[in-house]
Amino acid sequence: MDSYGFLLDLALILLSTKLLGLITKRFRMPQVVGALLAGVILGPACLGVLKETSLIADMAEIGVIVLMFCAGLETDVKELKKCGKASLVIAVLGVIIPWIGGAAVTYAFISNGTIESNAEASVLLQSIFVGVILTATSVSITVETLREIGKLKTESGNAILGAAIIDDVLGIIALTIVTSMADTSVSIAIVLLKILGFFVFAIVCGFIFFKLYQMWIVQSKKAMHRHAIAAFVFCLLVSYCAEVFFGVADITGAFIAGLFISCTSIKQFVTAKFDVLSYLLLSPIFFASIGLKVELPTMTGAVIAFSVILVVVAVISKIIGCGLGAKLCRYTNKQSFRIGIGMISRGEVALIVANKGEAAGLLGDNFMGPVVLVVVATTIITPILLKPVFKGEAVIESNEEAAETEVNAPVAGDIGTAESK
C-alpha cells in the first residue's frame, strides 16, 4: 500500500496550495504566496506531513521548465530585443552589488570569530562564495506572479526576464570562478566556451525548428493537438541539452524554446494548452516543493543575527543593484523599483548553488541555515511586493498580437484557459 502514497501526497499538495492560494488572494496577495506557504506548513519545517520525494522533485523540475517555457511563449521578442542592453546592465549590477554585500557581511562574522565555520576553504573564499549565493535570481516566482496579475507583458516585465537570463549566465561564471579557486580541475575558459556554445546551439536549433515548424503548420492545420506535443518535445530537448551538455540551467533552455515558438502563428493555441497543464498540476507541485525543501536547523543567537542581516542585505542589494542599473538605462523611478523588486527572489537557484558549495568545502554547516532563511524570506517577500508596485503599469500589446488573438479566439475558446484561477 505504501507504493501508492504518492497519490495522497499529490492530492494534499494540490488541495493545500489551492486553499492557501485562495486565502492569500482574499488578503490581496498573489496566490503564489499561498502555494509556497503550503509547502512550508506541510513540510519538515512545520507539520512534517509531507517530504520531498524523487517523484515530487522530478515533477517540480518539469513544472518550472513548463513555467519558463510559458514565459517565453508570452514574451514579445521585439520588445525583449529593445531592452537587451538595459537587461545586461541591470543583470551585471544586480550580480556585483549582492556579491559584495554578501561577502562583506560573511567576512565580518567569520573573521572576528562571531560564527565558527568548519569549511575547508579560507575565510575569504567562504565569504566570496556566500556572496555568489546572493547573486542568484529565481525568476520563476516573479514570472508566475506577473502572469497572475497580468503584468508580464510590460516594459518592466520584459526587463526582468532579460536580466534574469543574463543573471543566470553570470551566476554560472561567478560560481565557476570561486569553485576553481578551491578546485584547480575546474577551467573557467571551458565553462565560458560552453556557455557561448549553448547560445550558438540554441540559435541554430531554433532556426531549423522554426523553418520545419512553419512548413508543418501549412500542411497540418487541422491536427492542432500535434503542435502542442511537438512544442513540448522541443522545449524538453533544449532544456536537456542546456543542462547536460553546456552546464546552463534547464530553465534558460526552456525560456529560449518558448521564445522560438512565440514567433510561430499558433503560439496562442500552444500557450492555452500549457496554461491548463501548468495550472492543473505542475505549478502547484513546483511551488510547494520549494517549501518542502525548507528544514530549519538549530541555530545560535549569532547565527540568527547573521541570518537576519543576510536577508536584509539580500533584499536591499538586489533592489539597489538592479534598480540602479535600470535607472542608468533611463527607466523611470517606479520602473526601476519594480525591476529591483522582481529580481529579489532567490528560490531554488540559491539552494542549488549552496549545495554545490557545501560539497566543494566552500560552505560550513553553520551557514546552511541562514541561506535557507534567505531563500524562504526572499521567495515569499517578492510576490507580496510585486502586486502593489506593479499597479498602474501599462501592458504592451502590439497590433499584430491583437489581430492574431482575434483570429485564434475560436480555437482558444474551444480548449479553454487557466486564467480564471
Image (tube, rainbow, N blue to C red):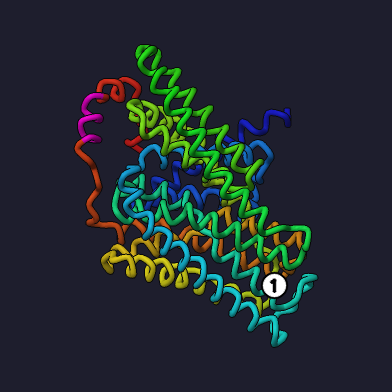
Magenta segment boundaries in residue numbering: 400-407
What quarter of the picture does the N terminus occupy?
top right
Residue 221 is situated, as x and y percent measured from the top left of the image, at 35, 14
Find disc 1 in the rendering and name its residue: 126
Task: Indicate the position of residue 337 as horizontal and vertical percent values.
Answer: 34, 66
Q: Is residue 242 visible?
A: yes
Q: Residue at x 66, y 66 (%)?
A: 369
Residue 214 quadrant: top left
At a point 28% along the width and 23% down the height, the residue shown is 413
Of the residues shown, which amino acid type is indicated by label 1?
Answer: Gln
Residue drawn at x 70%, y 73% is 125
Asked whether 287 falls inside the magenta stretch, the response is: no
Q: Is residue 203 above or below residue 38?
A: above
In this rendering, position of residue 414 left or right of residue 253: left
Mark 1 crowd level (few <14, some 14–19, many ≥20, 10 Å Cα): many
How far across and how far down the image is residue 165, in percent? 48, 52
Question: Vertical placement of 51 versus 375: above or below?
Answer: above
Q: Which residue is at the front of the view, 147 or 406?
A: 406
Badge count: 1
Whether residue 403 is in magenta: the answer is: yes
Residue in the foreground of this view, choosing between 397 and 60: 397
